Amino acid sequence: MSTDHHIALLGLGTIGLSMLALHLRRRDTKVTVYDPRPDYEKQLRSMLPGFLDAGFVSPTAEQPIPKTEIVDHLLKNNRLFLASSIAEAVQHATIIQEQSPEVTASKQAVWQEVTKTAAPTAHLWSSSSGVGASTQAAGNNTDTSVAARLLVAHPFNPPHLMPIIELVPGEQTDPDRVDFAREYFCAVPGPTLPASTAAGVAAVASASAAQASSEPQASLYYRPITLQREIPGFVGNRLAFALLREACYLVNEGVVSARDLDAIVTASIGPRWAVSGVFESYHAGGGAGGINAFLQKLAPTIDETWRGLGQLEMSKPGDPTEPLQRPWRNTVVRQTEEAYGPYTAQTKQKKDEMLRTTIEMQTKCWGELES
Ligand SMILES: NC(=O)c1ccc[n+]([C@@H]2O[C@H](COP(=O)([O-])OP(=O)(O)OC[C@H]3O[C@@H](n4cnc5c(N)ncnc54)[C@H](O)[C@@H]3O)[C@@H](O)[C@H]2O)c1
Ligand SMILES: O=C(O)[C@@H](O)[C@@H](O)[C@H](O)[C@@H](O)CO
């Protein structure tokens, strides 16, 4: 079996493990993984099977593989390799993706190390939540082509389930590298959908294939979206963190408890945003006049609300040690811990199942809406 893509995955934590499951769903990939943690193989063996679908069938197997045998099957069939250094991980890679800690200096050091031994043609992707490619490439004195090859492919946790990937090119990123990344993720199959929603997926595939038959076969599960310019936090996180700041403000002011605030979000704007986004929701809310009417009708309330939004700060500029003393933070942490206790593997599994059902509903309904 030929594999067109040899991916080096650097960092096998929360995102790296889920990203590994994403890549393994393509039939034309093999993946070499690396993490400096001495126990990363043990973590991989215990976690990866849970991220792969029950029906995961490697191209070299006729039947679904028992979850307990998946990792050994992948290793034996040269679809998965374990490296003990960055140099070893990247030596044959055509795509190098880092999921190391969200620390600028650490990411810059990773790319410095990568470019010592990686192929000068390799695509360079970062899973960063907010450190732009231009910043990560800065100061790389090993290979000046890094800035042209590096881009952020920001996933949402967990990437093996969440369909959106924010592609954020740096100021010097070659547009062809962005096109490659977009086509790559578009062709990654989604998790195995129950038969009940396969019809939805097929409908989306036929509608979109008719529109873009010249494009490579897309699975239509993953939807990479390219941002037009770098901005700290990109888009998803900026929106989420704006909401987080106001949520912390309302809890700290005693307006609502953390648990009740979560209930309001998950049973009102949350489901609505799973069906229609911010603008489409207000377009619908404006009646016949659409969003224009909505903004006109609600202008006084929106204006007053905007003027009164909480202005919390995580820390003073240049003083990263300061956040620990923020009183609002202690209130939010205490109420969240009282509400939910430790976040267990069982809770995560239940929430992943709920997330998957929501996304399957979207996939099915996109098909019905598209046709
Ligand atoms: N957790 C999320 O919700 C989420 C979502 C999207 C993006 N991200 C981004 O993904 C990246 C990783 O986040 P995470 O939550 O998986 O963190 P994590 O702490 O779970 O995992 C980071 C891993 O990187 C390893 N590591 C440390 N130094 C390394 C190096 N030099 N080379 C390779 N690996 C190294 C660590 O051993 C660890 O296993 C961050 O940039 C983060 O912003 C996280
Ligand atoms: O919401 C997500 O999954 C991610 O965007 C965030 O979880 C974010 O990337 C965090 O890593 C914050 O850094």
Image (spheres, grey):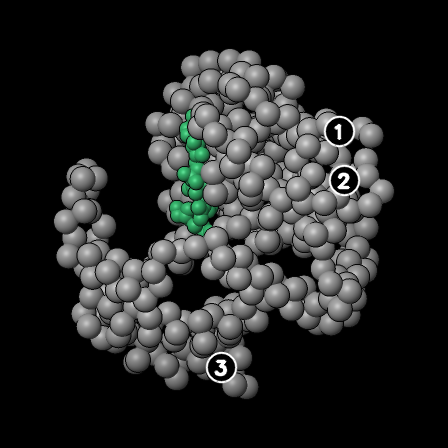
Report the residue marked by disc 1. 77
The residue at the point 59 percent across, 25 percent down is 82
Task: Check if mark 3's residue and mark 1's residue have beta carbons within 8 Å.
Answer: no
The three-letter code of the residue at mark 1 reads Asn
Q: Give the quarter the ligand 1 occupies.
A: top left
Relative to 24, is 348 above or below?
A: below
The residue at the point 40 percent across, 35 percent down is 101
Give the side of residue 12 with respect to residue 304, left or right: right
Whichever of callouts 2 and 3 sits on the residue coming sooner in the sequence is 2
Whichever of callouts 1 and 2 sits on the residue coming sooner in the sequence is 2
Report the residue marked by disc 3. 285
Circle 1 — which element?
Answer: loop
The residue at the point 61 percent across, 17 percent down is 91
Whichever of callouts 3 and 1 sits on the residue coming sooner in the sequence is 1
The three-letter code of the residue at mark 2 reads Ser
Report the residue marked by disc 2. 58
Instruction: Determine if residue 43 is in view.
Output: yes
x%, y% of residue 273? 50, 69
